[in-house]
Amino acid sequence: MKQEHKLFKGKTLAILTGGGDTSALNSSIESIRNRASMLGYKVYGIRQGWKGLLGDGDILDLTSQPYDGWYGGTALRSSRTNPFPSEKNPESRVPQVLKNLKRYRIDVLVSIGGDDTNGAAKRLYETEGIQVIGFPKTIDNDLRTRTMHHYQGKEIESVLCPGFPSAANAIMEMTARLKTTAESHSRIMVLEVMGRDAGWLTGAASFGGAQLALVPEVEMTRERKEFFFEVVKETYLNSKKKSLIIPVSEGVKWFDEKTGKLDVVYASSELDEYGHPRFGGISGIIASEIAQKLKIDARSQISGYYPRAGKCSEYDRRLTMTLADKVVDLLLREHFGQMPVIRKITPLVGLEEFNTTSIDMGDVGNKPLPGEYFDLNTYRFNDSYMNFLSNILVKPTFPEFEYDFPVVVPD
Ligand code: F6P
């Protein structure tokens, strides 16, 4: 009779998802669940992030349930609940979390999240001895995963987070689609892209055919704005079809002539439990300034939640499985407080466990775009970043319609 190697029989591992969703969350949950149950763990899902560990708890049994990892978002739901005291919620809810971890007999907690969710998990590990493993996720791609990118003999410290490949694919495709309407109206389309304080996702628009871009890493002071408008005018006039798509990151700091201040445009100044306001609206301001100053028809388009929505991409699917393989290693070695990451950026075929390592899961947030990836003098992403993205994305297949019809002159 075949002997079952159920190393962790009798133990329970629980998974939670916190922060903004991505198309790769269900894939991460499924991949971790499959591997943990193979090791013998009973696998629970905690609903709505840390919120599911408050009060009486909100916990589901995932152990042998059917699961669709291709389906975007998170079946566990998500929240921005912070168990530690914050300005918004000064009372600590850590005792409730600890009580529920005990009540539900949870031995290991896997927190799928960004800096905030994993930062809280790391604090529970350090201060309370809770056995946690972190798992990265964000469409913003701004976690310090220390993924190396080898480009033309140089090593660039880059980033690769599950959720980013699917989101980048959506932004690339959206840009390629917007091109035809921009061309039809000889317009400039200012495409606003999420990403908080980093321009990683905005670069995917350039991979989809946008020429210029604005990223949060470059502050748009009065002088920089003047120069930017000159570049926009020249690029527009030189464009074959008299149109442009300009992707701008939601977190761009823009000089406001009326107030004399340089700031991000906020959709809401209300802070979440981790102290973050909501960004949004910069594209409308830039489009109207372009129209006013350059007398060129300009429109804004907010891509908003679109890159977070829909099916998991193939790259993300494989990425989450590979990182989940590393979770097995961390569980076996009892390396808690760690997060699996990819060592070196590679096309899909190179996503294998030998290409993973683990890093300290606390304090990994806010990795801006490396200077090598963006040229602040031309407002363009460099070839090095296009090379990085070419590992993750496949260019849209429809070819450019190049036309040059002869003009009819009456006799
Ligand atoms: O961090 C992911 C993200 O999508 C950011 O790009 C964006 O600023 C934010 O979340 C939006 O959050 P919410 O879902 O709370 O509106």
Image (tube, rainbow, N blue to C red):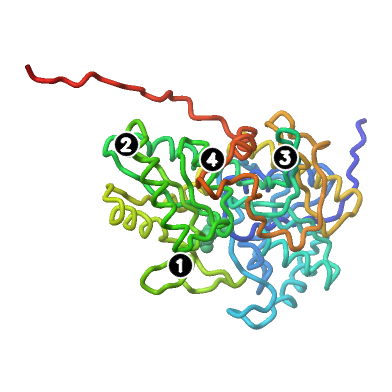
Q: Amino acid at mark 2?
A: Lys
Which mark lies nearer to you, 2 or 4?
2
At x 61%, y 80%, the residue is 87
Q: Position of residue 12 (x, y in %)?
A: 80, 56
Q: Amino acid at mark 3?
A: His
Q: Within 8 Å: ligand 1 and the Cβ of disc 4?
A: no
Identity of the residue furthest to the top in this view: 411
Which mark lies nearer to you, 3 or 2?
2
Which mark lies nearer to you, 1 or 3?
3
Q: Position of residue 43 (x, y in %)?
A: 75, 52
Q: Residues within 10 Å of mark 1 (few under 14, many from 20)?
A: some
Q: Which mark is residue 242?
A: 2
At x 26%, y 50%, the residue is 295
Q: Residue 197's quadrant in the figure? A: bottom right
Which mark lies nearer to you, 3 or 4?
3
* Residue behind mark 3: 149
> The N terminus is located in which quarter?
top right
Compare marks 3 and 2 and give the one earlier in the sequence: 3
